[in-house]
Image: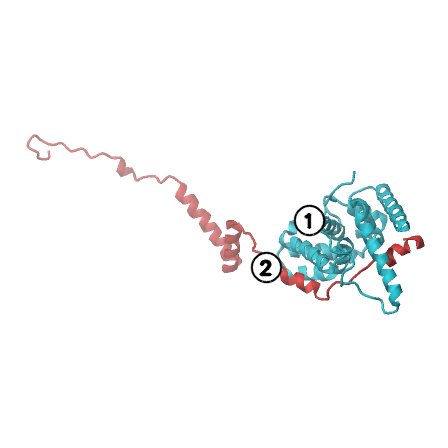
Chain colours: A cyan, B red
């Protein structure tokens, strides 16, 4: 059975190792200053990472405003309770914060009904003809619907690996599962998506 | 991601975040009310009000006063003497 929420407890350091060492150390230092109530440190951390966490949130909710709200909530939680993150227990800030954002996204999806997939926020590619645009839009809508219908863990694995481009090892770390389990989730997600899209 | 999976990437919709997202988050973070213990507050107050040697001297004096007040004070020996006076029946002192 799929688990509801990703564990936010201990993690390893695969993501930390994929980032420049200075950046990781800086994050830890910034978090120490945030604990002291330094807003400048908080601002630096937000500016450094808000884009990547927004991208992830957007993959879950497919709506800009909602994704921005989720990222804002996550950062404000960190600001209000910086002790949530503990040096040593959570090796890299980004690994841990991915989990926080994913959990907020999953909570958000449980609480709220999803917005219509084809809303006005969709942006047209000017190189496409009208028919191509309509076809592309239709395919996009179908893919979004099928991804939304995937079991939770498969959806998380897909978003982390395909759209956030985390390595399988990194994604497994964020999800708190073994590499083999993640690979299996990804495989199942891809097979399901291909089959569903062929049917349509 | 293999080339077989490219369609997964290309097909998916994405809108970039508002350019002011980071600023919005920072502005929404209100200054935190820091909890401070009484001892920490007093230490900070004394440290900011007194230079280091004076702080040490004040500490020693405070400890001295506290110890002094807690020690039993010996009474003068005279107080232990009992003055005995004899009274006659008429009330005059003998």
Image position, residue B59 (x, y; %): 48, 51
Which mark identifies residue A153? none
Q: Is residue B4 left or right of residue A98?
A: right
Q: Label 1 crowding class (10 Å Cα cut-off): few <14, some 14-19, many 20+? A: few
Q: To which residue does mark 2 refer?
A: B31
Q: Secondary structure at mark 2?
A: loop
- Return the x and y of residue B52 as percentages of the image width and height: 53, 57
Q: Nearer the viewer, residue B89 or A123?
A: A123
Which quadrant of the structure image shows residue A141?
bottom right
The quarter of the image holding the N terminus of chain A is top right
Q: Secondary structure at mark 1?
A: helix
Residue at the extreme right: B3
Left or right, A128 with reference to A21: right
Q: Residue furthest left?
A: B90
**Residue drawn 43% across the image and 45% down it:** B66
Q: Residues within 10 Å of mark 2 (few under 14, many from 20)?
A: few
Badge 2 and badge 1 both on one subunit: no
Estimate the spatial distance between the alpha carbons at disc 2 and disc 1, rounded to whole Å: 30 Å
**Please, which chain is the residue tagged with disc 1 on?**
A
Q: Is residue A99 above or below residue A129?
A: above
Q: Position of residue B63 (x, y in %)?
A: 46, 47
Q: Is residue A40 visible?
A: no
Observer-nearest of B60 and A103: A103
Q: Nearer the viewer, mark 2 or mark 1?
A: 1
User: Residue A111's mark?
Assistant: 1
């Amino acid at each position: 059975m799929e688990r509801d929420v990703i564990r936010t407890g201990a993690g390893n350091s695969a993501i930390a190792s994929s980032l420049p060492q200075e950046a990781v150390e800086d994050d830890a230092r910034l978090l120490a200053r945030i604990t002291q109530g330094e807003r400048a440190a908080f601002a630096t951390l937000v500016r450094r990472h808000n884009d990547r966490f927004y991208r992830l949130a957007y993959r879950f909710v497919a709506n800009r405003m909602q994704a921005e709200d989720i990222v804002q909530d996550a950062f404000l939680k960190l600001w209000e309770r910086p002790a949530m993150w503990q040096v040593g227990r959570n090796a890299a800030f980004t690994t841990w914060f991915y989990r926080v954002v994913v959990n907020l996204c999953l909570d958000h999806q449980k609480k709220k009904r999803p917005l219509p997939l084809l809303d006005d926020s969709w942006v047209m590619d000017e190189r496409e003809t009208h028919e191509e645009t309509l076809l592309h839009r239709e395919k996009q809508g179908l893919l979004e619907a099928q991804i939304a219908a995937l079991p939770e863990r498969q959806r998380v694995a897909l978003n982390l690996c395909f759209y956030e481009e985390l390595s399988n090892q990194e994604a497994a770390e964020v999800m708190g599962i073994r590499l083999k389990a993640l690979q299996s989730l990804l495989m199942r997600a891809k097979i399901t998506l291909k089959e569903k899209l062929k049917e349509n | 991601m293999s080339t077989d999976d490219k369609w997964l990437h290309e097909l998916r919709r994405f809108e970039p975040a508002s350019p002011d997202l980071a600023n919005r988050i920072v502005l929404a973070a209100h200054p935190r009310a820091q909890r401070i213990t009484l001892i920490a507050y007093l230490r900070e107050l004394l440290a900011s009000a007194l230079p280091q040697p004076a702080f040490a001297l004040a500490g020693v004096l405070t400890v001295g006063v506290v110890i002094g007040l807690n020690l039993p004070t010996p009474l003068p020996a005279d107080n232990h003497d009992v003055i005995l006076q004899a009274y006659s029946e008429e009330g005059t002192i003998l």
